[in-house]
Amino acid sequence: TNKVFIPEVFFTNDCLTGEDVVKSTRVLGDLDGVFQDKEAYGKMNKEQAVYHVSSYLPVLENTPGGLFMGITTLYPGKVGQEYFMTKGHFHSNSDRAEFYWGVEGEGFLILMDERRNVWAERMFPGSLHYIPGKVAHRVANTGYQKLVFSACWPSDAGHDYATIADAGFARRLVDVNGVPTLV
Ligand code: F6R
Ligand code: ZN
């Protein structure tokens, strides 16, 4: 039996070979424009890793009816008072939904609908989050250890990063006297 190790998960099914696992890393330099405090961002080491994603893509991108799964490891840290977070995106096929679930560490899933209403759900080991279609999603690590979460999304969802890169989320998760607060 093939055993493929991607962060904290062992796949033991024969059809899951490591060849379909795509790994990517986002360093601080890849997140230019994402955080509010430009001065704090400017002083930080741009080579510092913020998160890694291992994605298991058993079918080709855009295949209708398939599923992808990924594991994201998001490091603890802040830029100014704002917690380290993922870029965040809508899906290109905007009505495609997704599950996220917490594996390790603590944080928040930050969600924004098309009317720019923003809300957050606490993530912890075992937490389960259904992200409906047309809802942008990003995760912030509010803890002192790495935050690991898994995701499962349709293989024809695609990723629209441009909308968030242009307009951001309407609220940010920041440390206000030690309390994660949406502002
Ligand atoms: C896939 C998905 C996750 C994220 C990952 C990194 O649809 O939502 O696998 O891709 O957590 O976040 P982004 O893609 O926003 O940089
Ligand atoms: Zn997604």
Image (cartoon, rainbow, N blue to C red):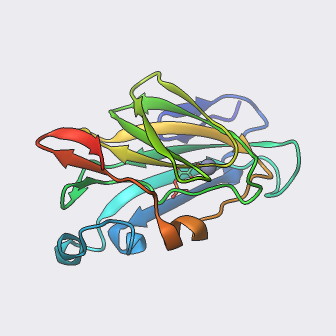
Q: Left or right of 80: which side holds 127?
A: right
Name the residue located 78 percent from the left edge and 49 percent from the top edge.
155
Instruction: Between residue 64 and residue 81, name the one nearer to us.
Output: 81
Q: Is residue 146 above or below residue 35?
A: above
Q: In the image, residue 59 lies at what x, y percent?
A: 82, 50
Name the residue located 37 percent from the left edge and 46 percent from the top edge.
140
Question: Split into 4 quadrants, where in the image is the N terminus?
Answer: top right
Q: Is residue 113 above or below residue 14?
A: below
Q: Left or right of 10: which side holds 52?
A: left
Q: In the image, residue 84 lies at what x, y percent?
A: 31, 54
Query: Do we see residue 144 in this rendering?
Result: no
Instruction: Between residue 44 and residue 17, name the one nearer to us.
Output: 44
Name the residue located 18 percent from the left edge and 61 percent from the top edge.
80
Q: Left or right of 45: which side holds 75?
A: right
Give the quadrant of residue 36: bottom left
Query: Do we see residue 29 in this rendering?
Result: yes
Q: In the image, residue 53 lies at what x, y percent?
A: 51, 52
- Give the residue furthest to the left: 177
